[in-house]
Amino acid sequence: MISGMEVVFLLLVLLGQCCYAAYNTNASVVAGKLNVHLVAHSHDDVGWIKTADEYYDTVKGILDSVLASLQENPDRKFVEVEQAFFSRWWNEQNSSIQGVVRRLVKSGQLEFANGGWCMHDEAATHYADMIDQTTLGHRFLKQEFDVVPRIGWQIDPFGHSAVQAYLLGTELGFDGLFFARIDYQDRLRRTQDKNLEFVWEGSNTLKSDNQLFTSVFLRHYKPPKGFNYEGSGGIIMQSFSYVQDDPSKGATNIEERVEAFVNAAKVYANATQTNHVMWTMGDDFKYYRSAEWYTEMDKLIHYVNKDGRVNALYSTPSIYLDAKHAADQVWNVTKNDFFPYADNKDSFWTGYYTSRTVLKGYVRALSGYLQAARQLEALTGKRDHPNTDNLWRALSVVQHHDGVSGTERQKVADDYARLLAIAASEAEKSMNLAASCLAAGVSPSDCLRKNVSSDAVQCPHLDISFCPSSENITSDKPLVVTAYNPLGWAREEYIQIPVSSNALIVTDATGKAVDSQLAPISDATKKLRKLHAELDIGVIPEDETLYSLVFKAVVPPLGFSSYLVKPSKPNENGKWFGSAGNSRVYEANITDSSTEYFWYTGQVGGQNSGAYIFRPADNNPTPVTSSAWLAVEGPLYKARRRQVSPWIYEEHRLYNGETHNELEITVGPIPLDDGVGKEVIVKVKANTTSNSKFYTDSNGRDFLERVRSKQVTQPVAGNYYPVNLGIYINDNQTDLSLLVDRASGASSTNDGEVELMLHRRLMADDERGVSEALDEQVRRMVYVNSGPVKEASRWRRLKGQRIYSPLQLFFSTPSGQNVPKQFSMVKSGYALPDNVALLTIQELEDKSILVRLAHLFEAGEDDTLSKPANVQLKQLFWHWEIQGVNELSLSTNQDKSSMKRRMEWKVAEKSEGGAKRGARIDQKSLLVELGPMEIRTLQLTVKPKNVVTLI
Ligand SMILES: [Zn+2]
C-alpha cells in the first residue's frame, strides 16, 4: 500500500530523473575549441573562525549532499581535499554507502586532490611536519581506495614556498600544483603576459630534474562573477543569475546566460595559454546545498554546448592537467618562491609569519617530540594504547593554513593547543614506558608482553623552569636524569633543570663526578614560572629559592645516558659563592650590546596591522630603553641578563666549548594601555657588509637568497620573509646567523644587521576574516653565531638539527644506588655522517619500520658536506636484524621503483640538470647513498635481535 505522500515523492523522483536526463552533460574535451573545465570543489578549513570539530558538522552535510548529487548524474564530478574531514565522514558511513563512494572514486567522479590531512600552511610549517601530515592522508587514501593523488591543491595559503614545489610536489609524485594567492603586481604582470601557468623549478640543488607544472587561478578560487551559487543569504535571498529555461515560469534567460558564460570564458582564455581554461566552481564551505551548483552546471553545460562557440564540461584538476599536457605547449620557468604575498600596496601578509608565537612554539616543540617518541616506540614495540598516533593526527590538523599560521580565532588556537596537549600526554606515557624498559634492560618483546610499570616521568614545563621531580632532591631521594638523544650523531650538550638546592653534585653512570654549575634563576624566570604554572597547569608554585643546575651530558646516537644528582657539601662542587651556588653573580658594567630591541607601531586605520598583515604605522621602529646587566659566571658558562623594559627580559649565555650565544628572550605581556599595538623585534648586528642581501630558509630546508628592495610599497613589511630554521647575512669574510626555535618573520632592513620579529600584540583586526586582535605572551630562544663564512653553513645545519630534536629528559628515583648504563640503538663506534639526519623512525601497522634519511646540505653549500653521503643501515640499526628494505615515495603511498615517470613539460629556457641522487639500495650491503638535499624513504622489514645492550 502506497500512501499519498509516497506517491508525491515517487513522482518528484521520476520528474527529477526526467529533468536531469533532459540536459546533455556528458561533454568531454573537444579539440579546436575553447574548453571550459568546470571543477566543483569546496574549500573546507580544518579550523579558523570555528574549531575543526565545529566545522565538521557543516562538512558532513557537504559530503552527504555531494554524494547524492553525484549519484543523480554520472557526468558530475567533485574534488575532495582535506582528509581530516573526509576520513572522519568515511568512517561514519555504512558499508553500502562506502561501496557507492568506492564506485564514485573508481569512475573518477570523486577525485582526491592534495590528499593530506589538511591544506597545510607554507610559511610557518617545518618540512618534517608537512611530510608527516601529507603521509597521514595519503596512507588513508591508499589503504581505503588504493588511490595515489597526483594534484597539489594549495588554493588558500598566503604565499607559496620552494619546498612545497619540489619536496611536497614532485617528490610526492604530483604532476601539477594549483593555487590562488600571489602578489597583486605579479598577478597583473602574469595575467597580461599569459603567464599564470608555468613550470616551477623550486630546488636550486635538483634544478631542472625537479620541475612542476603550476597553475595560478585568475580569480581566487571562486567561479567567474555571476556564476557563484549557494550564497550565505539562502537561495531565496540571492541575486545570482540562474538559468531560467521554463517558459511556464515567465521569461527565459538562456541566451543571456550563455552569452555571459562565453564572455567570461574569453576573459579566462586571454589570461592563459592553450585552449583550456579552468573555472573553480566553489568557495569556502560550499556544496552544503550541492544541488544548486550541479543543477546550474547541468544547464550551463547543456545550453553552452548547444550554442557551440565554446565547449563546457564537468572536469577535475587531473583531467584539466592532462589536457594542458597534451597541448604540447612551451611554458616559462619560474624559480625560487612566492613570498611575500600582498593583495594590494598596503597589505603585505607578513604578519602571520609571527602571529600566535606561543602556538607556533608549541607546535615546533611537539614536532621534534613526536619524532623522538616514535623512535622509542619503534624500538620497544608499539602498543594499541598509549601510543603516538593521536599526536600525529593532532599535529597534522594544526599544520592547516589557519592553524600554525596563527590566523585563527583565539578560541580555535586554544582548541588546537588543547588537542595537542591531550595527544602529547598520551605520547608521553608511551615514551615513559619505553624509557623504563630500556633503562631496566628489558628486551623489546618483553617490554610489550610484560606489564612493565613506568617510574620514569618527563617535565613538559621545563621551558618555564617548572619540574616537581627535580625540585625536591634529598640524600634519601636522589634523582636520576636520563637524557635520550633522538639524533643519529653522538652528542655533548648542556642540560638545564630547576632545583631547589644550591649544593648538589652530579655523577655519571660509572659514579664519576661531572662538572656542573648552579646559579640562581632570574627574576624574569620566576615571574614566568609563577604566571604559567598557575595559568597552564593550575598549580601555584611555592615562592622558594630556585636554582638552575647545568651539566654536560654525553649521549650516544639514538640512545641515552643517565646521571645521578644528589646533595653535596657546599664546596664539593667547585668554588662556593654561598646563596649563588658555584656561580658568581654581579652587576656588570657592559656598555655595548649585540642585541637591540624595538617595536613597530601596528597601523590602525586604512589597512590595519593584524593577524595576517604586518603594516607598521612608521617604518622607523621605537627603541626600547634598557637597564644594567647582571653577569653570571661559573665553571660551565658565562651569562649576562637584563631587564630591557618592564616587559622584555633577555639572557645571553655562552657555554664552554661553544661558539654561539644562546639568547633567552621573554616578551610580554605587551602593554596596550597607551592605545598602541606593538610588533616587537630584536636586531642583531655584525661586522659584515651584506650588500642588501640576506638568506632565509624555506620550511626549515633550503636557504633562499633575498634582496632587500627599496622599491616595494611597504619598505619594511614588504621585505619580511618567513623563517623556520633561520636567517643569515654575510660578505666574503664574515657571517652572522640567527637560528630560531619556532616559525617567525625576519628581515635585514639595513646592511650588517638582521631583525627578527619576536611577538605581536595589536589593537585592531586586519579584516581578512579572523575579526580579532592578537593578545598573547611568550618566552623564546634565539641562537646567534658570528664567524668565518666558510664554517657558517656547518654550524647552521648541525645546530639546526639539535634545536629541532632536543635531548628528551626523563626523571626517576634510583633503585638502590644503581644508575642505568648508557644505551644506543647504533653499533658502538658508528654514527650518521655529519651531513645526514634521521627524519623518521616509525613502526607501521604491519610492524615494519618506516625510516626517512635526509641529506642536510644543498649543492655547493659547503666544500665537504655538500658531497654525497653513505649510511650503513646495518650499523645504524644494530638492534634489528634487517630482513629487507623497500624504497617508497616521500608520503609512502608508492614503491619508488614502480613510480610512474614524471610528466615532462616543454620549457622556454633550458636550465642545467641537478645534483646526482643516490644509487639504488643493494639488499645485501644495505648501504644507502644520498645526494645533496635528497630524502630517502625506506620501509624496513625487521626482526628484533631481542637483546638490549647496555654499554
Ligand atoms: Zn582556507
Image: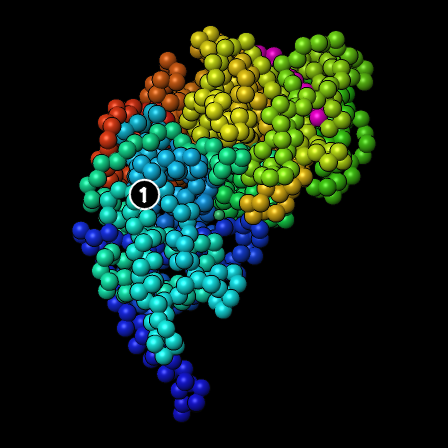
Q: Residue at x 61, y 47 (%)?
A: 771
- Kindly identify the amino acid type of the residue bearing the numbered disc 1: Ala
Res 916 quadrant in image: top left
Task: Give the side of residue 508 with respect to residue 737, left or right.
Answer: right
Indicate left or right for 41 with 273 as reference: right
Q: Is residue 538 above or below residue 921?
A: below
Whether residue 341 appears in this view of the structure is yes
Q: Is residue 626 left or right of residue 368?
A: right
**Numbered range of the magenta stretch:** 648-657
The residue that mark 1 highlights is: 271
Q: Residue at x 41, y 85 (%)?
A: 8
Vertical relation: 74 (above or below) 885: below
> Foreground residue, 450 or 534?
534
Give me the residue at 43% from left, 22% from top. 705
Q: Quadrant of the N terminus?
A: bottom left
Q: Is residue 88 magenta?
A: no
State the residue in front, 819 or 231: 231
Q: Give whichever of 261, 36 is nearer the camera.
A: 261
